[in-house]
Each structure stands twice: as structure tokens, then as C-alpha cells.
Amino acid sequence: MPVEALALELRGITKRFGPVVANDRVDFDLKHGEVHALLGENGAGKSTLMSILYGLYRPDEGEITIEGVPVEMDSPATAIDLGIGMVHQHFMLVQVMTVTENIVLGSEPRRGALLDVREGARRVAELSDQYGLAVDPNAVIEDVTVGTQQRVEILRALYRDARILVLDEPTAVLTAQEADELFQVLRALRDDGVAIVFISHKLGEVLEIADRVTVLRRGVKIDTVPTAGATEQSLARLMVGRDVLLRVEKAEARAREAELEVEDLQVRDDRGLEAVRGVSLNVRAGEIVAVAGVDGNGQQELVEAISGLRHPDSGRIAVGGREVAGRGVRTTCDAGVAHIAEDRQLRGLVLDFTLAENLALREYRSPPLSRGGWLNINRMTARARSLLAEFDVRGGDAGTLASSLSGGNQQKVCIAREIAANPRLLLAHQPTRGLDVGAIEFVHRRLVAERDKGRGILLVSLELDEVRSLADRILVMYEGAIVGEFPSDASEEELGVAMTGGAGQTAA
């Protein structure tokens, strides 16, 4: 009986960017009807390898075969024609267009010379029903949830008859419920024979959804293993090359005076609707207070108000006793607040600036980085080199543009800048989003170390494991209000009930 050809095979793929070898003779294959996970640390070469597959880069060496036939992948258009679809970590959707318009864009059904919108909506609804990807064909993208936007990205690939689907960090911006829904969709696609490449840093998810796992480390393939019999610890060891501590070890907090005091805060969202309703909380020096909740329950608006990015309707915000509510970002920074932003590309970095420039964004106005209105480039560069080494930022040096780094390394640049500012209060909003397991371990240890130095830390995270590992106290936010305070040893069940509007509790 003849052996069925592989859906995809990459052989000996090598890609260099100047002196940096992003992929070094990498082999990777994909079978029909399987989910093959691609794991590796930030900067390990995963995105480069998939960009080569999708025609965004040309390999320096190596061969790509589809269904056993060698192909030249010279552009994304070629990849699409060969049945490859890619859902990027940062969605590529036109916000002011409808779901249907985004899905059919570039392959629009027509009636004569005119766009046939009704036929497009019909075909979108048909695909949606076939794979359980629930969307409203007529909804505008800017009005739908992040989870819905991801379904639109997948439908766009399926609309073009993709039989090989590449998902880059597909759950990075999803709630737990949305991730579960995505996995149901991926199982249906797998059962239909679609071959799926699943890139993720979340080892539990990889074990849940993948059939096989290939691990890259610094551009080199380390191994390909079945998920049957693998553990989070064994995969982490392959990724990092050493044992990784998956739980945070920390001493009892020694909390002191309040660094942050929030009283009866009222904040509206971009639509003018009440997003934060009468929130009061405090964070003391030497403790980590975590805010948990399902995404979209006012966490973003709360952080923006505290950091000075959003003007509250009413209420009090004080940092070290200094009133900062509604007084802007500069006043808040001068009061001693550092902000690790949720969206590193929108709020954390200037992508067209060098790493040295990005690392100086908080302190460029002050000695030793400037004097008399003139920047000291040598000192900026020396400081950047020190921070890049301290925070293990890979893929560039002080003169590298921020846009050229992987997402995880961009995040480490943001974290380095904010911690280096020596703040009284550190606002950490999704600080490990998009980070690999080794980098997460580093960031968690660093946050605990900053707590032990006496900083107050307000952690806002959608990851319950992270919340429970790091927090000394846990506040649950639901529909814009704090509905419960819990000790750090609260169970996921207790927190889950409060996060969905059930009864909360106040810690003793």
C-alpha cells in the first residue's frame, strides 16, 4: 500500500540576517489531519521558519515540498495558491470593514463587474456553520471581540481553501473560554484533514491540542516528540536546555506603607460607557496585588487611569501620597509609577526607534542621558547594552530597531526599561504575554525580587496560574467593580466563580 505524501516538509532550512543565523539547517514536516506544535524560546527561529513557509522570506539554503512536490515559495500569494493559510499573532484585519469584507478581501465574489456582497456573506455563513466558527457576517471588525477577530482570520484562510494552517500564538489574547472554543474548532479542522502548525509558549495548551511537538533552540532543531508521554517539564527542558521552575518560589511578603491608593474611581471607556465603577484598592510597598478577571471587565481602563493614560470621571488616585488622578502620564511617571503596557507594540515601544532609544524613553530628559537639551548617545548606548544583557534580550544590540525583534524580546525591552526606572509602583499589565517558559520564569523571579526590594506591584493578568503564583493578595474584577478579595492560596474554582459574577469574599 503506497505511503501517503506528507502535507508539508521543510528540509535543511537555513536563514541568515547578517551575522545572525535565525534558522540553521532546520527540518520540519507536517502530516494531513494533525496538529504539529512548534516550540522554542523567544528568538529561537519559529516565526522566521514560518515566514519562510509563507513566502515572506526566502531561505538561504534548504527545500520546501508540498504533497511531496518541491516548490519555490516566493511570496504569500504563492503560499495561498498552494493551500497555506497563516493567522499572525497580531491580526491583519481592516477595522472599519465588516467580517465578510475582511474574509473575501482579494478574492471577492462578483456579479459582473460588481462585488456580490450577498454571495460573500452566504459563503462566510456556510463556512462558519461547517467549522463551528460563529461570526456575524455583517458585523464591523472594530465592534467585535478579539476572539471573534481570530475566528475571522481563520475563516479568511479557509475561504481561500487552505489545507495547511499556521497559527502563531493563537491564544495569546484569548480568554480561557475563547481558547477552549478555538481548540474545538482546531479538532474539527484536524478531523477534516487540515494540517495545522500550532506555535505557542503555553505548554499545557500544546499538550492538550497537539499530536507532535518540534522544539527549536537558538535556530537549531532540538527534537520532534509525540505529545503522548510528554510533560510540561520535559518540553520546558527541551526548550531551554535546563530544568525550569514552573512555580514561583517566594518568601512571605513584608508589606509596609501604601504606595498606591485608589478611592471610588469611576472611568469611562472609549464609547463613553462606564467601565470602572467605584473601585477602591491599595497596594503597599513590598507586596504584589493581582487583579484577576475575564478580559473586558474594566481592567484596561483601570490601568490606563492609574498610569495617566485615561482621565477618570471621578475618584482619587494617589502614589506615595501624591495626587495624580487626571494629571497625565508625565506627572504619574514623576510620582514614581512604571507601566509595563499590555500591548507592547501600541503602548510599549516606538517600533522605528532603536533599542537604545526605546530604553531611554522614560529618562531621556535627565542626566546622565542628556544635558542642556542634548542627548548623550554614548551613554544611552552603554546603558542599553547593560540592560539588554541583564534582561537577556536576544536578536539585536543597542542600535537594532525594535521592530526587528521577536514579540517576546520586545516585551523584555519594555520590562527592562520600566524596572530600570526604579519606580515606587510597578503596574504590570499582562507582563508575560507572548513570552516563552524560560522568559516567564525570569520575569516572575524579577517581579518577586522587585517586591522584596520594597516596591509596590499591581499585577493585572488573565492567566490564573500567574495570578496565583505571584500575588500576595488577589482582587477579582467583574463588570467594572471589585467583587472580591482573596488570599494567594485561593483555588481556581473560587476565583472562577467570582470572575463570572458569583459571590466573592473578603480575605481575613
Image (cartoon, grey):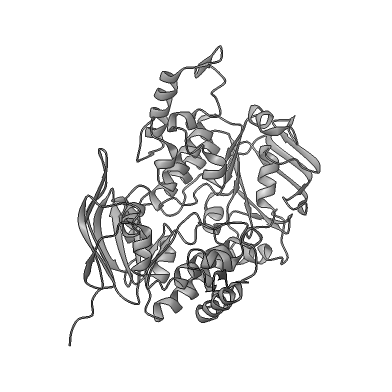
* Residue at 66% across, 29% down: 330
Q: Is residue 13 left or right of residue 85?
A: left
Residue 142, image quadrant: bottom right
Taking the view exactly as shown, the residue that stands out farthest to the top is 372
* Residue at 44% across, 50% down: 435
Image x and y of residue 148, in percent: 58, 66
Of 388 and 85, the residue lying toward us: 85
Query: Is residue 242 at all visible to an observer of this figure?
Result: no
Taking the view exactly as shown, the residue that stands out farthest to the left is 1
What number of labels is visible?
0
Residue 149, image quadrant: bottom right
Q: Is residue 47 left or right of residue 347?
A: left
Query: Is residue 419 at all visible to an observer of this figure?
Result: yes
Of 242 and 384, the residue lying toward us: 384
188 lies above or below 433: below
152 lies above or below 451: below
Q: Classify the position of the N terminus by image quarter.
A: bottom left
3 lies above or below 343: below
Residue 424, image quadrant: top right
Image x and y of residue 470, in percent: 54, 49
Taking the view exactly as shown, the residue that stands out farthest to the front is 113
103 lies above or below 215: below
Image x and y of residue 17, in percent: 28, 42
Taking the view exactly as shown, the residue that stands out farthest to the bottom is 1
Of 336 and 487, the residue lying toward us: 336
Of 151 and 85, the residue lying toward us: 85
Q: Is residue 428 left or right of residue 156?
A: right
Image x and y of residue 401, in percent: 42, 36
